Amino acid sequence: MIIESIVTGPMQENCFIIADENTRSGFVIDPGWEAKKIKKALDKHGIEDVTILLTHGHFDHISGVSELKELTGAKVYMSPDDDFLLGSVGGSTAMMCGMGNAKRFEVDEEIHEGDTFTAGEITLTAMATPGHTPGGISFYDGKERVFAGDSLFEGSVGRVDFPRSDGKALIKSITEVLYSLPDETIVHCGHGPDTEIGHEKRTNPFTLNPGYLM
């Protein structure tokens, strides 16, 4: 299996490539910015067939989508509950963050709880993890890793001070969905370093004291 993380854009967002070595097919999760940099990594690994999966619709995770679609021909999948955020691409907040010249795009297919995406021997299952955004999705490989977007970080959780964020829903997503995975599961976060489910269960102050976000 091929897996590579690429830090993109001024907000240091983590984009992930996960692909099957035999079929040279795979996924790009959250191409937030710098599409040419992501395409260069795909070419390095010889990945020719790629699908774009989005954990949520904030501009720092999706502003590279349009250009990457043009470069690869990939289809894009996202929860319809985050459609209202698509207009943030190239918007005023993105401009203030130095990401204002991105083109907007349309999602090709919706993601719903339990949907599966397969590339060779890799299967990713969509797990609904709302809270940071209404349509937050995590992708679990069924074995050892989960791509959690901005739901869960090492020692922290996603912000819930945005429009339509929900702290109670986020805590439920983490404690009832993500924390149901094996303790040794690697969590690939939308920003910052990887962590593990067991480590966060034992030490994350926001889930040990959920009143912070309620």
Image: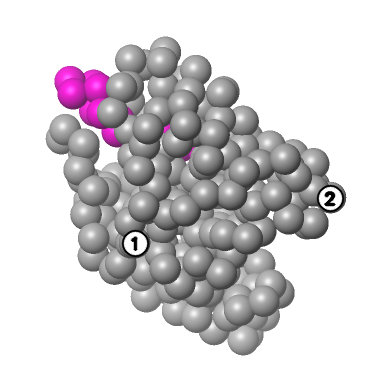
Q: Position of residue 43 (x, y in %)?
A: 41, 15
- Residue 210 appears in view: no
> In the image, is 158 to the left or to the right of 55?
right
Q: Residue at x 42, y 54 (%)?
A: 107
Q: Which residue is mark 1?
A: 110
Q: Amino acid at mark 1?
A: Glu
Q: Secondary structure at mark 1?
A: strand
Q: Which residue is mark 2?
A: 96
* Span highlighted in magenta in the image: 15-26
Q: On the rendered image, what quadrant is the C terminus found in?
A: bottom right
Secondary structure mostly seen in magenta is strand
Q: Residue at x 26, y 55 (%)?
A: 125
Q: Position of residue 59 (x, y in %)?
A: 63, 53
Instruction: Give above or below for 3 relative to 98.
Output: above
**Front-most of residues 56 and 104:** 104
Q: Position of residue 69 (x, y in %)?
A: 45, 36
